[in-house]
């Protein structure tokens, strides 16, 4: 089925500059590595867009209308239909001291001033020439583009709208509950402390109410669950020391020694001469009577 304006679609593309033949952007991880433009902080894969909303250059989105999913198309865009012509009025000279809290500027470096992206064109004595034109302004662009998928499921559409505003967390982790015109989005723990989360939730709400007229109320639910303590492991019981068979045989052959009696405390030396006993011992009777003596 050919796509039309307003469709939720996933697209793949590779972008080259016609004048130089240089590949400057792609949704394919393998292509990015091959042409040495791969970035570890970037996520590769089909890009989610709502056709006609202006996520991609206007001329490119217009060329996708009527294209069937799976078909590949090469589109050439003039600067006017791409990122516009270069405007000399968007060049600025910025004092070098403005970079004291940033990395020292070098030509070609992308920076941000006053909330706008810019490119450093030249660095002089105490001044930096900054260009607020889009890096591809004034260039003729060549896109190899294809439609990967057309989204029809409502939950899939909502998940992709969330991912567009909160790309740091996998979209499948946001649980959705819809009751009539009320939508509840359960926020996963990974998103609780993201910088700018409140602004992102406001943008998600605005997108949902724009593209889903039947949704009147959007609620974000953050659930803090009690962390269960880890079970304590039982104390390891001391294992009896293993006795080798040789020692067991030796122990059987040798009789056990009698336990030694504890030494008694030293006694005082007895006197060499014992004292006579107070009690007199009976003497042996003499033989015969006195009359016989």
Image (spheres, rainbow, N blue to C red):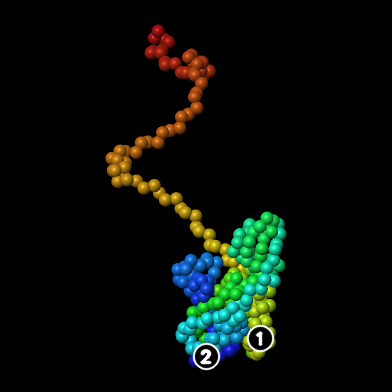
> Who's the residue at 48% across and 70% down the image?
32
Horizontal relation, residue 31 to residue 59: left or right: left
In terms of sequence position, does the residue under pointer 1 or pointer 2 come before the other?
Answer: 2
- Mark 2 lies on a secondary structure that is loop
The residue lying at 63 percent from left, 66 percent from top is 119
Q: Is residue 26 above or below residue 63?
A: above
- In this rendering, the answer to whether 140 lies above or below 235 is below
Which x, y percent locates residue 41?
A: 55, 67
Tag 1 residue: 210
* Res 187 visible: no
Which one is in front in this view, the residue at disc 1 or the one at disc 2?
A: 2
- Residue that lies at the very extreme toward the top in this rendered image: 293
Image coords of residue 266 (percent x, y): 49, 24
Query: Against 104, is 211 above or below?
Result: below
Quadrant of res 114: bottom right
Q: Nearer the viewer, residue 201 or 266?
A: 201
**CA–CA distance between discs 1 and 2?**
24 Å
Q: State the residue in front, 85 or 204.
A: 85
Residue sitting nearer the eye, 276 or 18: 18
Q: Is residue 36 visible?
A: yes
Side of 127 where 69 appears, left or right: left
Q: Which residue is mark 2?
A: 66
- Is residue 232 or residue 70 the one in the foreground? 70
Q: In the rendering, at what x and y percent does residue 107 appear?
A: 60, 61
Q: Helix, strand or loop at disc 1?
A: helix
Residue at the (56%, 82%) spot, across then down: 60
- The number of callouts visible is 2
Q: Where 125 falls versus 27 (above or below)?
A: above
């Amino acid at each position: 089925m050919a796509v039309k304006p307003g469709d939720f679609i996933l697209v793949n593309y590779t972008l080259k500059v016609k004048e130089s033949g240089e590949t400057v952007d792609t949704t394919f991880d393998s292509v990015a590595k091959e042409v040495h433009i791969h970035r570890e902080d970037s996520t590769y894969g089909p890009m989610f867009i709502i056709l006609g909303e202006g996520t991609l250059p206007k001329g490119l989105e217009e060329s996708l209308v009527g294209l069937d999913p799976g078909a590949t198309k090469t589109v050439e865009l003039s600067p006017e239909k791409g990122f516009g012509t270069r405007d000399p009025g968007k060049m600025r000279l910025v004092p070098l001291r403005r970079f004291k809290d940033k990395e020292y500027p070098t030509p070609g470096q992308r920076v941000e001033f006053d909330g706008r992206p810019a490119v450093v064109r030249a660095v002089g004595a105490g001044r930096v020439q900054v260009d607020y034109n889009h890096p591809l302004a004034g260039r003729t662009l060549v896109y190899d583009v294809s439609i990967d998928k057309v989204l029809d499921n409502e939950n899939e559409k909502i998940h992709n709208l969330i991912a567009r505003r909160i790309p740091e967390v996998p979209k499948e982790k946001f649980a959705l509950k819809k009751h009539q015109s009320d939508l509840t989005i359960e926020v996963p723990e990974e998103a609780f402390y993201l910088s700018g989360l409140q602004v992102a939730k406001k943008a998600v709400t605005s997108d949902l109410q724009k593209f889903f007229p039947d949704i009147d109320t959007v609620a974000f639910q953050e659930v803090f669950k009690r962390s269960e303590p880890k079970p304590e492991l039982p104390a390891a019981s001391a294992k009896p020391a293993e006795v080798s068979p040789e020692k067991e045989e030796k122990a059987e052959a040798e009789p056990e020694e009698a336990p030694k009696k504890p030494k008694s405390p030293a006694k005082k030396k007895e006197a060499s001469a014992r004292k006579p006993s107070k009690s007199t011992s009976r003497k042996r009777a003499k033989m015969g009577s006195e009359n016989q003596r």
